[in-house]
Image (spheres, coloured by chain):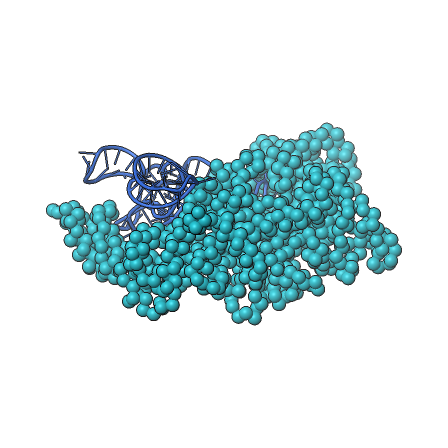
Chain colours: A cyan, B blue
Amino acid sequence: MAEEKEFRYDPALIEPKWQERWAADPALYAAEPAASGKPKYYVLEMLPYPSGQLHMGHVRNYSIGDALARHMWMRGYNVLHPMGWDAFGLPAENAALKNNTPPREWTLNNIAAMKRQMQRLGLGYDWATEVTTCLPDYYRWNQWFFLRMYEKGLVYRKKSKVNWCPDCATVLANEQVIDGRCWRHEDTIVEQRDLEQWFFRITAYADELLDDLDKLEGWPEKVRTMQRNWIGRSEGTEVDFFLEEQEAVNSEQGAGNREQGTKGQRIRVFTTRVDTIFGATSVQLAPQHALVASFTAADAVLKAQVDELIEQQKKAREAGDLGAIEKHGVATGRFALNPYNGERVPIWVANYILMDYGTGAIMSVPGHDERDFEFATKYGIEIRRVIAPAQPGGEDAALPFTTEDGVLVNSGEYDGLTCTEAEKRLQAVAEREGFGKATVTFRLKDWGVSRQRYWGTPIPMIHCERDGLVQVPDEQLPVLLPPQIEITQQGGSPLGRVAEFVHVTCPKCGGPARRETDTMDTFVDSSWYFYRYTDAKNAAQPFDPARVGYWFPIDQYIGGVEHAILHLIYSRFWTKVMRDLGLIKNDEPVRRLFTQGMVIKDGAKMSKSKGNVVSPDDMVARYGADATRMYALFAAPPDRDLDWQEDGVAGVSRFLGRVWRLVTKYAPVANMGRSGWSQSRKEGATGLSLKLLRKLHQTTAKITLEFEGRWHFNTCVAAIMELVNEVQAVDARLAAGEVEPPVLHELLSSLVLLLAIFAPYLAAELWEELGEAGSVLRAPWPVSDPELAKEDELEIPVQINGKLVTVVRVAAGAAAKDIEAAALADAKVQLRTAGKTVAKIIVVPGRAANLVVK
RNA sequence: GCGGAAGUGGUGAAAUGGCAAACACACUAGCCUUAGGAGCUAGCGCCGAAAGGCUUGCGGGUUCAAGUCCCGCCUUCCGCACCA
């Protein structure tokens, strides 16, 4: 019975139909030029890595962004809502090894598959601006930026200890090492290797990256805090302790000795508390400190002890709890001289000193530092008080006394100064005498971008025996990845094995030269992709500055908090570099950032190993895209974790079915009232009509408000459900014609408009059912009329001594005294106040009344 | 250890100092039959026959009024963690 079957909501019929129509109309989601005169709105979701399959985290991320984009379109904004592919990276090479498929082919196939999934979900992207980072028309600009940065001294090459992941067979940035393990291989311990590497000088922007965090008021405080911690700015002083001369040891290797002093070797330490220097009772070196090597060269026993300390650090690093390492140390038998008073203090090597922070050496002040105190107590090193609390009688304050609110004691001529005054004076002396200076240390390190991989952007440099490092000339860009390459597991750069890639003519001298064979970290790609969206086809420059000037900064960026430091700090850096290159005007790329919660199932993050992965394709096949997306928004507020329960998706699907039946049932009647309803609606509407219109306008107001502030879209969906429930509850009266066609029309068409941002397919179908010609997507967002939304009677809770007793009905605008009278007249109130004194009555008009009774 | 977020029915959650549990899920009972992953009606925090009482992790406080604000504690999750 085909006719009957029609009366069932069937997303499998509706959705593909509209998907086809939308695909045939690219202008639907296209951003307009600046000249459109509309206010602009740039909404962006983080681009995915094309693994081949969308997961529920993506579905949630894109459902949030799509609802926002649709809302802004309907509000009359010129919206840029793009999508692209973070398409370089190691998995493509692994897949090549496994399936013998070239990385390019594998990646492009995955992109096609995921794009189909996105289109099936009905996500409204402007595909004309699509960016695919592994294609030459994109990565040539990575190379172009690399060269501009090289010219500005922001790119350099140095041999350094690098993080090496044996599984990736490549180098990792510090940011990609988590608790001593690879960020992609949880079980793989990262090794340290010595390699020539390319670096971006992100530290040149450390101060600005830190300071500008204060401007990012639209960012979660959590993310800003994480970035602050990561940058780790610390003000202090570098001071040289003089190494006591000792004939027995040759002193030619003075690597700890940055400024060759006239009096022999020095040990430079970094401290934030130079005011405590008269309490320094030892100098502690990191086991890897260059000076240590010179001590152990002629002392096998000491060397063994130091190796043991290195081993302890390595183990702690692998265990991921460097902070919990038990402190061990060994005295070297050597001594250093305090530059301020010539005091002779022992030099130790300790496992709690890190070579990669500060200078790899400290002055140990056990009286005023917890860690030094613990160490000194264990090894019997002198603990001396040099700071007393500012208050009189403070000599009794227990050591270690670590606060800076104090005055110096036992510090010679500096006695009596406050810590702050002393620091300034001591720094001035150090600078004058040339044994130290005020300095700022960062935890942030320069960004190592070299990768010994194939599937990445080739670094556009040439090594010439005669001319040294030579830039690839701009007109030779892009340096293309050779298409045919054998991927193997052997170490070293795969590009190095492609002779026709490596052998090149030097652009300067024309002689034979070698191409650089490293490729760039894929975080380079994602550092500026969102600029390219504004001008994705530009073949002459990375983008037209005028377009960027119009669209930037991004109004709303949406993604997972896992990118809080990596991607989001690199992007900020790149923006500042582009600004200093004169390409853009904005200091920051993103005005507002939203970090969504994770999608979990059965209390755990979805993962193959736990077997709790829910496939978006399955959900769409069973319940449709609308129900899947709407559930992703309904089950929890967007910032919280979302527990995926399939029964909940089914529930949303049933709800959409109710909407479908309701609208299709009454559309013919509603359509009769399409025109005659604009002025004096309130006067025209009475009884049931007024009641339903009121609920409609309240719902519209509520949803509009959520988009403007709190973003609790789950309550928006709930509000639409309430509205539908209320209409459905009076189905019999509607059928009896109790509601005038113009009211019915406003009711149903507004319902469809509200639904359009969450369930676009169904909304499009029902919009057509209601006889509307244009796209529901471009229809104006309904406006809530405050007069219509207003209740004319209110229920006021009445409390006695703070306990709810009853509820009284009063007119909406009732004055305090009328509410008071109504409350006192209430039977339950009279019963409870009989024989007692009403001492006080508090009335908050429109809200509550409370009687204080004794 | 430091910093942040959270803790409410059987479950997901709602309540922006003013009726705790909206909206859903699950469940129970009934109806319907086009037997569907459908629809409709009613019930559903706890104790109680009812009247009524109790209830937002625990303990204090502010307030006429606290899930919401303040103080202390507990638990869970996240970030940082010998950073000198």
- Which residue is painted at 14% across and 46% down in the image? A831
Vertical comparison of A85 with A397: above or below: below
- Residue A187: x and y in percent read 63, 35
**Seen from this angle, which residue lies furthest left?**
A835
**Viewer-nearest residue: A802 or A362:** A802
- Which residue is painted at 75% across and 58% down in the image? A477
**Relative to A684, is A644 on the left or the right?**
right
**Seen from this angle, which residue lies furthest front?**
A1
**Viewer-nearest residue: B8 or B11:** B11
Q: Is residue A95 visible?
A: yes
**Viewer-nearest residue: A284 or A814:** A814
**Relative to A848, is A305 on the left or the right?**
right
**Relative to A241, is A483 on the left or the right?**
right
- Which residue is painted at 47% across and 60% down in the image? A776
- Residue A606: x and y in percent read 53, 39
**Seen from this angle, which residue lies furthest right?**
A511
In this rendering, the count of numbered labels is: 0
**Viewer-nearest residue: A122 or A589:** A122
Vertical comparison of A98 with A203: above or below: above
- Residue B49: x and y in percent read 21, 34
- Residue A296: x and y in percent read 74, 34
- Which residue is painted at 40% across and 52% down in the image? A661
Q: Is residue A202 visible?
A: no
